[in-house]
Image: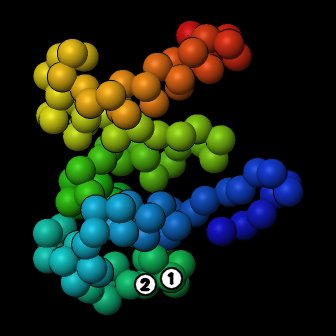
């Protein structure tokens, strides 16, 4: 993770892969098995010793259940796991109260800053 300003952090692809893998509660070996990459490749990507190919990024994204764009989103944009959210909740009424409140706060903030 490279620091740019005291309040702003820049996350590398390595940081994002590791973060998402941990969020999914997967070991490197499990991610490798699911994605079809080798465990050594996953370890090298997460340590920043290897830049993944587009093919490998697609495999990792699929295994982590995200779009490839998540690996390249700007540092100040928080990416919601909309694919998984949509699969779990078919209608807004099905959202649990915690998720509903969190999304409400994000939408209000986006409106306040002129994003929506």
* Other residues around mark 2 within 10 Å, as few (<14) / some (14–19) / many (≥20): some
SS at badge 2: helix
Depicted 72 relative to depicted 114: above or below: below
Depicted 102 relative to depicted 7: above or below: above
Query: Percent x, y for residue 24?
Result: 28, 62
Q: CA distance from mark 2 to mark 1?
A: 5 Å
Q: Quadrant of the N terminus?
A: bottom right
Depicted 94 relative to depicted 75: above or below: above
Q: Number of callouts in the render? A: 2
Q: Which residue is mark 2?
A: 44
**Which residue corresponds to the image point at 36% horizontal and 48% vertical from the top-left?**
68
Q: Would residue 86 appear left or right of 116 to someone viewing this image?
A: left
Colour scheme of the rendered structure: rainbow
Which disc number belongs to residue 114? none
Q: Which residue is mark 1?
A: 47
**Which residue corresponds to the image point at 53% horizontal and 40% vertical from the top-left?**
78
The quadrant in which residue 89 appears is top left
**Which residue corresponds to the image point at 56% horizontal and 10% vertical from the top-left?**
116
- From the viewer's side, name the closer residue of 35 and 81: 81
Q: Residue furthest right?
A: 6
SS at badge 1: helix
Query: Percent x, y for residue 64?
Result: 26, 57
> Does the residue at mark 2 contact the one at mark 1 (Cβ under 8 Å)?
yes
């Amino acid at each position: 993770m490279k620091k740019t300003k005291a309040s702003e952090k820049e996350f590398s692809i390595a940081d994002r892969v590791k973060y998402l893998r941990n969020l999914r509660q997967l070991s490197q070996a499990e991610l490798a098995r699911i994605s079809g990459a080798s465990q050594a490749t996953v370890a090298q990507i997460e340590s920043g010793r290897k830049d993944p190919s587009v093919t490998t990024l697609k495999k990792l994204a699929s295994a982590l259940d995200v779009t490839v764009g998540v690996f390249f989103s700007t540092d100040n944009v928080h990416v919601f796991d909309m694919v998984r959210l949509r699969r779990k909740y078919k209608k807004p009424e099905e959202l649990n109260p915690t998720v509903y409140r969190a999304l409400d706060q994000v939408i209000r903030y986006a409106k306040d800053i002129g994003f929506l």
